Image (cartoon, rainbow, N blue to C red):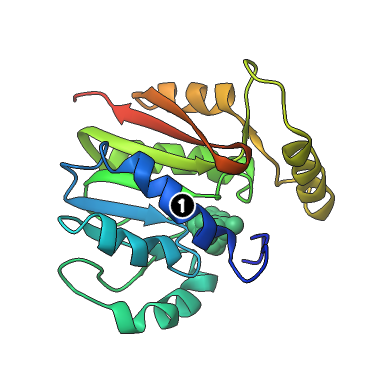
Amino acid sequence: MSTQPRIGDLSAAERNKRPIFDALADWLVDARDILEIGSGDGTHARYARERLPHARWQTSEAPGHIRGLTAALVDAHDEARLPSPLALDVRSAWPAQRYDAIFAANVAHIMHEDAVAAMFAGVASHLVAGGLFCLYGPFFDDDETPGEGNLAFDRALRSRDPGMGIRRREALDALAGQHGLVRVARLVMPSDNRLLIWRRDAD
Ligand SMILES: C[S@@+](CC[C@H](N)C(=O)[O-])C[C@H]1O[C@@H](n2cnc3c(N)ncnc32)[C@H](O)[C@@H]1O
């Protein structure tokens, strides 16, 4: 999917990977099995192998993008730590496994609302009790004045596809709450992004 602004020669994922994993490191210190939704070109997954050497990072992509992801990661394949990508559309069947954490970057504004809702439902039923859902990207928030950059990005997304758009943090919290997920962090990240983290309640 091409909604990744490039500045100079670096993709958005190349630029944001370090701040994301700096912020995630303490949260994921005990996470062994981690699922990534919408892994894109695998940039975060490659970096995860470096930053979270204890973890098994399971990448995934919507079926239409799985070949590109698989090709991008072929040289990095490692069954114990970076296994082959899974085809996963969050609106369809999920793997029959539970994860200690689930991560996704820059997916909520690309997915339509039905897919965002399906993602929260799927996440909640595929996390272990106490597991974390870590969602990075731009969000609007009633507590914050929206930045010009995010307002323009939101307009551009909606003019390209009315189903896309930057999601409100409150709406995501409400969806999360419906599925037993409680938000435990709202971290400010570079370029007016946020890292939102929810924890799944005990069974
Ligand atoms: C802007 S890209 C972000 C890619 C990568 N996470 C990154 O940060 O570079 C959005 C991703 O969401 C994925 N996506 C969109 N709808 C999806 C769905 N219904 N299920 C799973 N992934 C989806 C796209 O295939 C795409 O890879």
- Residue at the extreme top: 143
Q: Position of residue 123 (x, y in %)?
A: 36, 41
Q: Position of residue 140 (x, y in %)?
A: 65, 29
- Residue at the extreme front: 8
Q: Where's the N terminus, which quadrant?
A: bottom right
- Report whether 181 appears left or right of 50: right
The type of residue carrying mark 1 is Val
Q: Which residue is nearer to you in this view: 150 or 62?
A: 150
Residue under label 1: 90
Does the beta carbon at disc 1 come under 8 Å from ligand 1?
yes
Tell me: residue 105, above or below residue 53: above
- Report whether 76 appears left or right of 119: left
How many marks on residues? Answer: 1
Q: Position of residue 68 (x, y in %)?
A: 49, 78
Q: Which residue is nearer to you in this view: 139 or 125?
A: 139
Q: Position of residue 143 (x, y in %)?
A: 62, 15
Q: Is residue 93 visible?
A: no
Q: Is residue 7 visible?
A: yes
The residue depicted at 79 percent of the width and 46 percent of the height is 158
SS for callout 1: loop
The residue depicted at 29 percent of the width and 74 percent of the height is 84
Within 10 Å of disc 1 (Cα), the crowding (few <14, some 14-19, many 20+) is many
Q: Quadrant of residue 176?
A: top left
Q: Which residue is nearer to you in this view: 133 or 162?
A: 133
The residue depicted at 20 percent of the width and 52 percent of the height is 33
- Report whether 36 appears left or right of 38: left
Q: Where's the C terminus, which quadrant?
A: top left
Q: Quadrant of ligand 1?
A: bottom right
The residue depicted at 65 percent of the width and 17 percent of the height is 142
Q: Quadrant of residue 47?
A: bottom left
